[in-house]
């Protein structure tokens, strides 16, 4: 009997990744992580820049907290500090100048929420020496429909009642009608319109010599007010 030759059994080779491949993967990860880090740093820097743009260029200025009528004294409680990004065209009062504003007068009506501009503050009294302040209550038919503003020059016209006209000679010589009495005045303040009657009280500055007579006439309600075409002064 012949013997059959047997081949020796060779154990199967285990396939292991070369050490060099692991090193390649590691090197590939490092640039990716570095790029991610650079991107995060750039994003953080951009966020900081935008935050600086939003907050770094904002300026503390004064704004109006409560309504102040023209001619009234500005009190500390009438103002509030606002932080805004200023437009070059705006000239608001800086918050640091608050003490220079409080105690002065409003040159125009101050509206809550608006920035306080330098031109809205004055240290001059709105009634000058040699003038008197007269308040006149006027119904809608006694004044122009156009809104009056402080500083406007107006003509206060006397409108005698029917009884007053009947009691006096309404004509002059040669039958010519007498011109109504008038007083030139300057608007100092315009009050709020009454809800029930629509009446508005207008404070006007007039020469001291005309003050008493105008006040007496205004008390009767027999006056009208016209806006001078010359505008404000």
Image (tube, grey):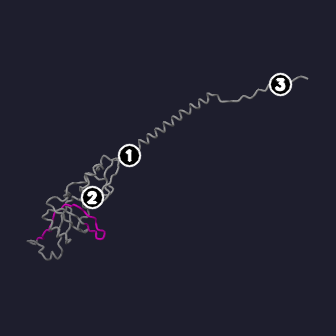
Q: Which of marks 2 and 1 is nearer the N terminus?
A: 1
| Distance CA(mark 2)–CA(mark 1) | 31 Å
Asked if the residues shown at circle 1 and circle 3 are in contact, with their CB atoms under 8 angstroms apart, the answer is no
Disc marking residue 6: 3
User: What span is in magenta?
Assistant: 176-200
Residue located at (16% from left, 63% from top): 132
Q: Nearer the viewer, residue 114 or 197?
A: 114
**Residue 44 visible from this viewpoint:** yes
Q: Mark 1 points at which residue?
A: 55
**Residue 107 visible from this viewpoint:** no
Q: Which of marks 1 and 3 is nearer the N terminus?
A: 3
Q: How crowded is mark 2: few (under 14 residues within 10 Å), some or many (20 or more)?
A: some
Q: How crowded is mark 1: few (under 14 residues within 10 Å), some or many (20 or more)?
A: few
Percent across and percent down for residue 5 are: 84, 23
Disc marking residue 109: 2
- SS for callout 1: helix
């Amino acid at each position: 009997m012949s013997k059959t030759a047997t081949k020796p059994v060779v154990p199967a080779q285990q396939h292991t990744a070369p050490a060099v491949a692991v090193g390649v993967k590691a090197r590939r990860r490092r640039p990716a992580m570095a790029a991610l880090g650079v991107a995060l740093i750039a994003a953080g820097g951009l966020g900081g820049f935008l935050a600086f743009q939003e907050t770094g260029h904002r300026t503390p200025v004064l704004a109006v907290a409560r309504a102040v009528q023209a001619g009234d004294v500005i009190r500390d409680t009438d103002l509030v500090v606002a932080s805004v990004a200023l437009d070059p065209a705006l000239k608001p009062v800086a918050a640091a100048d608050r003490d220079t504003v409080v105690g002065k007068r409003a040159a125009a009506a101050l509206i809550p929420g608006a920035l306080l501009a330098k031109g809205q503050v004055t240290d001059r009294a709105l009634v000058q020496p040699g003038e008197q302040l007269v308040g006149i209550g006027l119904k809608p038919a006694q004044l122009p429909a156009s809104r009056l503003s402080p500083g406007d020059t107006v003509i206060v016209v006397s409108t005698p009642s029917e009884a007053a006209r009947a009691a006096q000679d309404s004509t002059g010589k040669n039958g010519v009608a007498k011109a109504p009495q008038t007083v030139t005045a300057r608007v100092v303040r315009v009050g709020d319109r009454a809800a029930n009657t629509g009446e508005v009280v207008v404070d006007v500055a007039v020469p001291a010599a005309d003050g008493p007579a105008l006040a007496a006439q205004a008390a009767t309600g027999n006056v009208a007010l016209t806006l001078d075409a010359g505008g404000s002064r």
